Image (tube, rainbow, N blue to C red):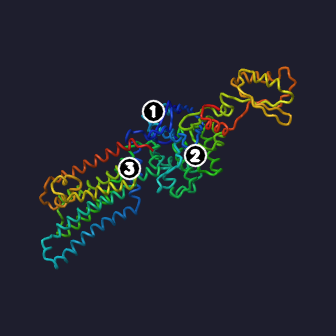
Amino acid sequence: MVANTELQRVGLSGWRTGLANLMRKENHAWWASLRQLVQSLLWTVVINGFVALMAFVLLPAGREVDPTLESLESLTMGAELLFKIGLLALAFRTIVLAQDEILGERQLGVTEWLLSKPVSRPAYVLSKLLAHGLGVLVTLVGLHGALGYGLLSLIIGEPFPLPPYLLGMAGLAVHTLFYLALTLMMGVLTANRRVLLGVSQGVLLGGALLTNLPGTAVMLTPWGLVNVLPAAVLELPLPLPIWLPIGVTAILSVISVAVTLARFERLEF
Amino acid sequence: MIETHNLSKAYKGVQALKDLNLTVKQHSIFGFLGPNGAGKTTTMKLLLGLIRPTSGSGTVFGQDIVRDSIAIRSRIGYLPQQPRFAGDMSARETLHFTARFFFSGPRPKIEARVDEMLDLVGLQDKADRPVNGFSGGERQRLGLALAQVNYPELLILDEPAAALDPIGRHEVLQVMERLRAHTTIFYSTHILDDVQHVSDTVAILNHGELLAQGPIEDLLAGGDKPVYTLSLKGDARRALARIEALPWVSGVHEVAHDGLETWEISVTDDQAAEAQLLSHVLAGEALTVVEFSRRKFELEEIFMSIVEGGTNGR
C-alpha cells in the first residue's frame, strides 16, 4: 500500500489545472493511432496526386488537342489547385476529425467524468485545441505543404521560391485552424451532431460560393483565401495586402475559441 | 464535511432540488435515499461543480462548492451512476491517467497504487484490456477503483452497487466498510438492505425535498414518533383505558391472538414512555407482560412511509 505522503501531489494552478495530463492523453490519442496517421497521409497524397495528374498528364495531353490551353501554365494551374483544393480538403478533414472531440465526449459522459477530477474547464477545451491543432498542423498542413513544395519545384524544374510558398502555407495553416476552432465551438454550442456538421461544413462550402461575388469584401474573410493564397504564392498582384485575410481568419479563430471557453464554462453535465 | 444551506436547482422552471439543508459528518457512511428523480444525482453534481445551484449554497471541507470547486475535487473521489471513460484506453491506462491528475510521481509508486486499485476491485486479470469491452459490472468496479485512486477524504458514489451481481454488491459493501476509517462516504442507492447494513446516517429525498435526515438507529427506532410493543396475558381492558388516557400516548393499535393481547403504542414523549409506560400498565392489575420493547422498524417501512406520506416523519 502506497501512502499519499509517498507520492508527489500535483499542485492546483488555476485555469491550467489538469492541462498537462489532458494534453498527454490527447497527444497520445492523436499520435499513437496509426490509423489516423495513415488516413492523413492518404488524404494528402490523394490531393497532391490529383494536382500532379493535372500538371503532368492531363494538361500536356489537353494542349495537344486544344491549342487554347497553351496559355495555361502548369505552374499557375498547379499552385491554384494545390491551394484551392488544399484549403477545402484540409478544412473538411479537420471538421471530420474534430466533430467528436467535445460533442462526442459530452454525449458519452466522458466530459462529466473528467470534470469530476481536479480539471479546470479552460484546461479541457485548450487540451483539445492545442493537441488537435498540433496534430492537424503536422499531419495535414505540414505533409500537404511538403508534398506540394516538391510538386511545384518539379513543375518549374528548380526549387520553388520559399518565402511566397511559406506565406501561402501560413495562410493554409490559419485557415485549417479556423475550422478546428469552429468545429470545437459548435461542439459546445449544440448537442446535435447534425447541426454541428451542418454549420461547420455549411460555413466551408457555402462560403466558397461567396468567393464568386464581385468586390473585395469577401477577400477579407476566410473564404477569400481560396482566391488570394494562390495569387500570393505566385507573387501576382493582389487587390489587398495578404496579411489582411490571414489576420481576419486568425481573429475569427480567436473569437471562436473565446466563445467556446465562455460557453463551456456555463455548460452543465 | 458537507454542509448545504437551502441549496436549490431548477431546470427550465422545473424544481429538481428545493432548499436542501444537509449535514454530512466526517468518517460517516451517509446513505442518500430516494426514488428515481428525487434529486440525489442533482445534489451530487452540485457538490462536484458539474452543475450550478439556482439558489442557496454549500460547502465541502469548508470550501464553497462554486468558488472552490477544483480544490474540492482534488480531495474527492466520484463514481458516476453510469461510469464512462475514454474507451480506447485499458483499465490500467485509465487508472494511470486518473492518478496523474493528483500525483506527478514517482512513477513506480504511482504504478504500485494502480496495481493496488486493480487488486482491490478484482480487475487485475483484465487490466490491459480496452475498457470499451467491459461489462456493466466491470465498468462499475473500475469506476470504484478510479474513485479511490487518490485515497480521497470524501467518496461520492452514485448508485455504486446498481449494476453489480449479489457477490459484487457484497464486495462493494465490504470495501465501503473498510474505507470508513479513512474516508467519508456519501452515496446514493435504491438498495435499502445495503443501507441498513453499512450506513450510519441516512437522508431521504423525494421530489427534490429532504424528508428525513439522521442517524440510522434513530430512524429505525421511529425517530421522533417511537412505537412501543406490549404483549399481555389477562384482562387488559382497564389497563388499556389508563394507557389511552396518558397525555404522551398518541395512539394504541390492538391485536388479539391466541389469548395474547398485543398493543402497538405510539408515544410523543420517549423518555416518559420508557420510564412509566410499564408501571401504568401493571398498576393494580393481575396481568402478565410477555413482551415489552421499543419497536424496531425496517428501513423499507420507514422509507415507504416517508416517501408515500410526503412529510417529515411517519
Instruction: Give above or below for A108 relative to B181.
Output: below
Secondary structure beneath dot 2 equals: loop
Residue A5 can be seen in this image:
no
Residue B288, image x and y in percent? 86, 28
Residue named by callout 1: B55
* Contact between labelled residues 2 and 1, with CB atoms less than 8 Å apart: no
Q: Classify residue B158 as left or right of residue A91.
A: right
At label 3, counting other C-alpha atoms closer than 10 Å, the crowd grade (few under 14, some 14-19, many 20 or more) is few
Q: Classify residue B28 as left or right of residue B282.
A: left
Residue A223 can be seen in this image:
yes
Residue B228, image x and y in percent? 74, 29
Q: CA distance from mark 3 to mark 2?
A: 31 Å
Q: Nearer the viewer, residue A258 or A120?
A: A258
Residue A152, image x and y in percent? 20, 67
Q: Chain of mark 2?
A: B
Q: Nearer the viewer, mark 3 or mark 2?
A: 3
Q: Nearer the viewer, mark 1 or mark 2?
A: 1
Residue named by callout 3: A190
Q: Earlier in the sequence, mark 1 or mark 2?
A: 1
Q: Amino acid at mark 2?
A: Pro
Q: Classify residue B255 as left or right of residue A21.
A: right
Secondary structure beneath dot 1 equals: strand
Q: Residue at x 38, y 58 (%)?
A: A31
- The tag on residue B160 is 2
Q: Residue at x 34, y 66 (%)?
A: A42
Q: Chain of mark 1?
A: B
Q: CA distance from mark 1 to mark 3?
A: 26 Å
At label 2, counting other C-alpha atoms closer than 10 Å, the crowd grade (few under 14, some 14-19, many 20 or more) is many
